[in-house]
Image (tube, helix red, strand yellow):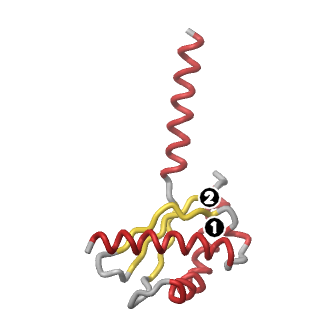
Amino acid sequence: MKHRIGRVEQEIQREVNDILLKRVRDPRVEGVTITGVELTGDLQHAKIYYSILSNAASDAEKAQAGLDKASGLIRRELGARIKIYKIPDLTFVQDESVRYGEHIDQLINQLHQQEREK
């Protein structure tokens, strides 16, 4: 059963990325990339993780509002593209791992710079 959930998660991720690029015309979701999908075991709820290129908090809030507003369209499009019994409810969550990775890179670069100065 877990193998099927993984396949459905990958399919949802691929299709939501495509829908955001081609169907959603909201300027608030430009630059949004889907980084992962987490489905519940009964396939009723999907937590969709996304990242944005900007680090500004206002851009993150705008992107979240745009995704929440477009969730009905995205869910309807998923229903047309994916053949499963019930399309899950969608919840969008900002993926902090990209920002965390950038922070770690900055810390490593600072350490290297301190080593060079010594």
Check disc 1 and give the amino acid type.
Ala
Tell me the residue at 72%/77% (across/down): 25
Q: Nearer the viewer, residue 91 or 11?
A: 11
Q: Position of residue 40 (x, y in %)?
A: 33, 75
Q: Position of residue 72 (x, y in %)?
A: 57, 86
**Residue 63, which numbered label?**
1
Element at badge 1?
helix
Find out whether the residues at labels 2 and 1 contact each other: C-beta distance under 8 Å: yes
Check disc 2 and give the amino acid type.
Ile
Q: Nearer the viewer, residue 7 or 53?
A: 7
Q: Quadrant of residue 116?
A: top right
Q: Quadrant of residue 5?
A: bottom left
Q: What crowding class fits label 1: few (fewer than 14 Cα within 10 Å), some (14-19), or many (20 or more)?
A: many
The CA distance from mark 2 to mark 1 is 8 Å
Q: Position of residue 52 (x, y in %)?
A: 62, 58
Label 2 or label 1, whichever comes before in sequence order: 2
Which part of the image, by quadrant, shows the N terminus? bottom left
**Residue 52, which numbered label?**
2
Element at badge 2?
strand
User: Extreme left residue here?
Assistant: 1
Compared with 90, 113 (above or below) is: above
Direction from residue 39 to residue 66 in the image, left or right:
right
